[in-house]
Amino acid sequence: MCEMSTKKVLYIEDRADNRSLVRRVLMAEGIEVLEATNADDGIRLAIQHLPDLILMDINMPGKDGFTATAELRQHTALAHVPIVALTANVMKGDREKTLEAGCDGYIPKPIDVDRFPTDIMSYITKGRQETRT
């Protein structure tokens, strides 16, 4: 691998099957994957590890992805970290709602395993830019 450093992605998702698929796809591309099964653990891991990208499930028991995103956005150490919603919310307006909630991007489930690593690297490379007004 020619990259200067291994990229690190934190995936906050309550479903083990979804975490397993994302882990397998990203690890095959040399991306380190940290996993959290709920929002509070995800916030703790994000602060502790400062990942290059956070993938956020929106529909989780307890604290949802919108609330977790808002809390993550309050930590200055994470200000540069893009948060991308990875969600089954695919109705009209759902993408806009996730962006308004503070996410930098939106990937619908089920993921396209062939395209997914490229999308993730694109979000990491872009970082947090002026994506919202």
Image (cartoon, rainbow, N blue to C red):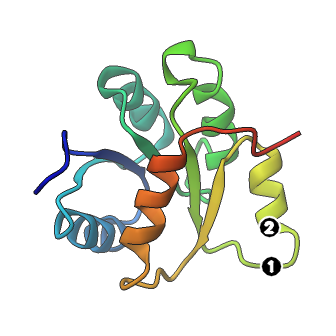
Q: Residues within 10 Å of mark 2 (few under 14, many from 20)?
A: some
Closer to the camera, 22 or 64? Answer: 22
Report the residue marked by disc 1: 91
Q: Kindly report the distance in space between the C-alpha atoms of the residues bearing marks 2 and 1.
A: 6 Å
Q: Residues within 10 Å of mark 1 (few under 14, many from 20)?
A: few
Outermost left residue: 1
> Quick check: 118 above or below 102?
below
> Quick check: 44 above or below 13?
above
In the rendered view of the protein, which quadrant contains the N terminus?
A: bottom left
What label sits on residue 122 in the rendered view? none
> Quick check: 3 above or below 94?
above
Q: Amino acid at mark 2?
A: Asp
In the figure, residue 108 lies in which quadrant? bottom right
Q: Amino acid at mark 1?
A: Met
Outermost front residue: 2
**Residue 58 placed where, x, y %?**
62, 56
With 126 as the anchor, is 92 left or right in this view? right
**Residue at 75% across, 38% down:** 130
With 120 as the anchor, is 128 left or right in this view? right
In the rendered view of the protein, which quadrant contains the C terminus?
A: top right
**Residue 103 placed where, x, y %?**
67, 47
**Residue at 44% across, 61% down:** 120
Q: Which type of secondary structure does the marked residue at label 2 adopt?
A: helix
Closer to the camera, 100 or 80? Answer: 80
Report the residue marked by disc 2: 94
Outermost top residue: 76
Q: Which type of secondary structure does the marked residue at label 1 adopt?
A: loop
Marks 2 and 1 close (CB-CB < 8 Å) = yes
**Residue 65 placed where, x, y %?**
62, 48
With 78 as the anchor, is 32 left or right in this view? left
**Residue at 63% across, 27% down:** 71
In the figure, residue 50 lies in which quadrant? top left
